[in-house]
């Protein structure tokens, strides 16, 4: 079995003005998906990322620098990530297609984890 990361982007401010009941309903969808995939042995972990600050560290001719990168200027925010286990990339895609993130947002990026 291989492991894959599901990257869960969304538009900046996507959840800011939602009524609490709507937000909690979305959270319940994600929790139900995690519980179902955990019972299948597919879900291996995940994290919700904070949206308060993003720093980019870059190496260039002048050395290494760190810059704040305001989220308001970003086209999208990486809201979180989840790790799943699947036989191959096609199986990971099928698992991702069932994710509620695609109901509440528009896309998921899938990357295979390279076991070192």
Image (cartoon, rainbow, N blue to C red):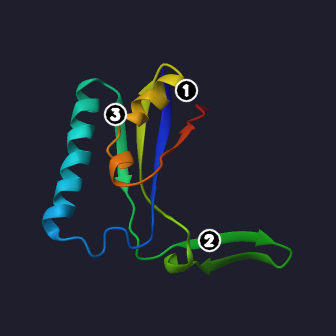
Q: CA distance from mark 2 to mark 1?
A: 29 Å
Horizontal arrangement in the rendering, residue 70 relative to residue 33 (left or right): right
Q: For mark 3, does the 10 Å Cα neighbourhood hold few (<14), some (14 to 19), or many (20 or more) residues? A: many
* Residue 32 marker: none
Question: First in sequence: mark 3 or mark 1?
Answer: 3
Residue 41 is left or right of residue 56, and the answer is: left
Residue at 23 percent of width and 54 percent of height:
26
Residue 53's x, y, as percent? 46, 76
In terms of depth relative to the viewer, which is nearer, 14 or 41? 14
Q: Which mark is residue 56?
A: 2
Q: Can you identify the residue that label 1 sits on?
A: 89
Q: Which residue in the structure is indicated by mark 3?
A: 43
Q: Position of residue 84 (x, y in %)?
A: 41, 34
Examine the rendered structure and indicate whether residue 54 appears above or below residue 107: below
Element at badge 2?
strand
* C-alpha gap between disc 3 and disc 1: 15 Å
Q: Residue at x 15, y 68 (%)?
A: 20
Q: Nearer the viewer, mark 2 or mark 1?
A: 1
Label 3 residue SS: strand
């Amino acid at each position: 079995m291989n492991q894959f990361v599901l990257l869960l982007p969304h538009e900046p401010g996507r959840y800011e003005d939602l009524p609490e009941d709507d937000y909690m309903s979305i959270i319940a969808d994600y929790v139900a998906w995690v519980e179902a995939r955990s019972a299948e042995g597919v879900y291996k972990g995940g994290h919700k990322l904070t949206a308060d600050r993003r720093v980019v560290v870059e190496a260039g001719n002048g050395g290494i620098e760190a810059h704040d990168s305001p989220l308001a200027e970003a086209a999208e925010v990486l809201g979180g990530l989840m790790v799943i286990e699947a036989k191959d990339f096609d199986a990971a895609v099928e698992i991702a297609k069932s994710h509620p993130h695609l109901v509440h947002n528009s896309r998921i990026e899938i990357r295979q984890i390279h076991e070192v």
